[in-house]
Amino acid sequence: MAIWEIRDGAMMSAALLRMGHAEAVREFIRWYAPHQRADGFVPCCIDNEGVDWLVEHDSHGQLLALIADYHRFAPDDQLVADLWPNVVRAAGCIGRLLGEDGLLPVSVSHEGYLAQPVHSYWDDFWALRGLRDAVYLARAIGRKDCALQWETLSKRLD
């Protein structure tokens, strides 16, 4: 069975982009992004049976980081414009999940947490990275309003 994970996809894409394989990354983004839920939740993985809706909170930031990394290496404003609803939904999901303490809720973002969900700083790292990259994307296409909003939100994770 084949399994595609956004975490592995984002990190492998970072390497592919540095090796000049932007088109493969673009194809992965275009394939993965439509699996995002309407509320912005990005699935951790997809296999031959479909989407896995396991509660992991790193995936939302990973999608944002992936799109921004692609744009940095292949300044494709059209792809950002096409995926803008996905960017808005992922950033919104992070914003809704972010607690008053500046942390995301417990999850199973590490395989060792399946039996007992716990707080994962991994989730917070990816949320911060994702929000900062959402700011970058907003600025890239002239959406200063969103850039300011997400920059403010990201400071809650600093």
Image (cartoon, helix red, strand yellow):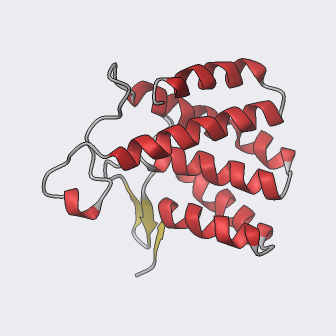
Which of the 4 image quadrants contains residue 121? Answer: top left
Q: Residue at x 58, y 19 (%)?
A: 152
- Residue 56, image x, y percentages: 35, 49
- Residue 91, image x, y percentages: 55, 33
- Judge whether 118 appears above or below 9 on screen: above
- Judge whether 4 appears above or below 33 on screen: below
Q: Residue at x 60, y 25 (%)?
A: 150
Q: 46 or 122, which is in the foreground?
A: 122
- Residue 94, image x, y percentages: 47, 33
Quick check: 143 left or right of 67?
right
Residue 8, visible in the rendered structure: yes
Residue 42, visible in the rendered structure: no
Which of the 4 image quadrants contains residue 96? Answer: top left
Q: Residue furthest bottom?
A: 1
Quick check: 117 left or right of 43?
left
Q: 146 or 132, which is in the foreground?
A: 132
Q: Quadrant of the N terminus?
A: bottom left
Q: Residue at x 85, y 51 (%)?
A: 76
Quick check: 142 left or right of 109?
right
- Judge whether 51 appears above or below 1 on screen: above
Q: 52 or 137, which is in the foreground?
A: 137
Q: Residue furthest left?
A: 115
Quick check: 54 left or right of 116?
right
- Residue 35, image x, y percentages: 53, 52
Count of numbered circles in the view: 0
